[in-house]
Amino acid sequence: DFVVVMPSMKDAVIQHLRDSFFADEPLNKAVGLCERGQPHAALERLCLATMTDGLSIAAMDGDKVLGVALNGILRHGDIEQSIEKIKQSTDEKFNKIFNILYTVSRDLNLFNTFEVDLIMECRIISVHENARGRGLAKELMKRSIDLARDNEFKLFKVDATGAFSQRICRSLSLEELKSVRYDEYCDESGTPIFRVPPPDHALCVMILKLP
Ligand code: ACO
């Protein structure tokens, strides 16, 4: 079953993310953000805030969450505000990840380029280890795009950090707006900030214009 995430499902979704996403997402994994099953306060705050937008979708097996697409609304000034927030944080691993995500998006100047006031953003797509490779993530993304259309968003965006999420985006006709190779994203001494093993090799900002 695919359902829109309701407030009553927040705890189950967070537990799913601790078990599946927090340790497995390519950038989280590269910096060793957290162990499987462990909480991460800052990441959970972002997930909970995204869920309050009411645009997230879960794949359920009874009352068990098999996968989620956490979708939120991006408004003018949100990215700049988030960049200021991480400057005050001392969590280096978390900051590394959100620094690349936020600065790449900020530099794309999406609101002016696409002449929109609101963007629907798929911030997290995650499927439980045991349920992967069966098309669940693709279906979650497809339904997210349908929800964006139904809610009259003109732009759907994904920061796809790995090969499989990028494959899903391409198969649903999203276009690659910007790609940053991890081996070319370096600190001042020329050392790559993320060591990401294949098949994941770049962050791709993918978008779909909705008529
Ligand atoms: N090996 C080879 N190909 C794979 C694999 C694999 N292990 N897993 C998925 N694929 C391919 C599929 O073949 C499919 O391509 P196709 O349609 O051309 O056949 C495509 O990737 C999508 O497959 P799905 O079955 O829809 O994906 P799945 O349900 O397995 O979930 C996901 C993919 C969400 C990336 C899962 O692996 C996961 O939760 N990973 C950890 C979290 C993560 O990295 N999330 C994405 C980060 S970006 C973001 O969140 C916005």
Image (spheres, rainbow, N blue to C red):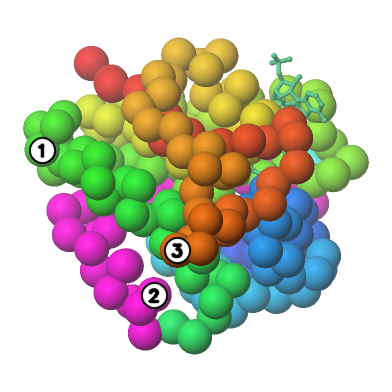
Q: Which residue is mark 3?
A: 188
Q: Quadrant of residue 12?
A: bottom right
Question: Residue at 61% of width from left, 22% of height from top?
Answer: 167
Instruction: Locate residue 190 relative to residue 167 in the image: left or right.
Output: left
Circle nearer the N terminus (3, 2): 2
At mark 1, the secondary structure is: helix
User: 133 above or below 4?
Assistant: above
Q: Amino acid at mark 2?
A: Ile
At mark 2, the secondary structure is: helix
User: 94 above or below 68?
Assistant: below
| Marks 3 and 1 in Cβ contact (< 8 Å) | no
Q: Position of residue 181 (x, y in %)?
A: 53, 37
Question: Between residues 167 and 131, which one lies in front from this camera angle?
Answer: 167
Q: Say if the magenta span includes residue 194.
A: no
Q: Quadrant holding ligand 1? A: top right
Circle nearer the N terminus (2, 1): 2
Q: Position of residue 163 (x, y in %)?
A: 65, 30
Question: Residue at 70% of width from left, 75% of height from top?
Answer: 39
Q: Position of residue 47 (x, y in %)?
A: 52, 62
Instruction: Locate residue 133 relative to residue 39 in the image: left or right.
Output: right
Q: Amino acid at mark 3?
A: Glu
Q: Quadrant of residue 85?
A: bottom left
Q: Position of residue 121 (x, y in %)?
A: 38, 43
**Mark 3: few/some/many CA within 10 Å (<14, 14-19, 20+):** few
Q: Which residue is mark 2?
A: 86
Mark nearer the viewer, 3 or 1: 3
| Marks 2 and 1 in Cβ contact (< 8 Å) | no
Give the extent of the magenta segment. Answer: 62-88
Q: Say if the magenta span includes residue 69.
A: yes
Q: Amino acid at mark 1?
A: Asn
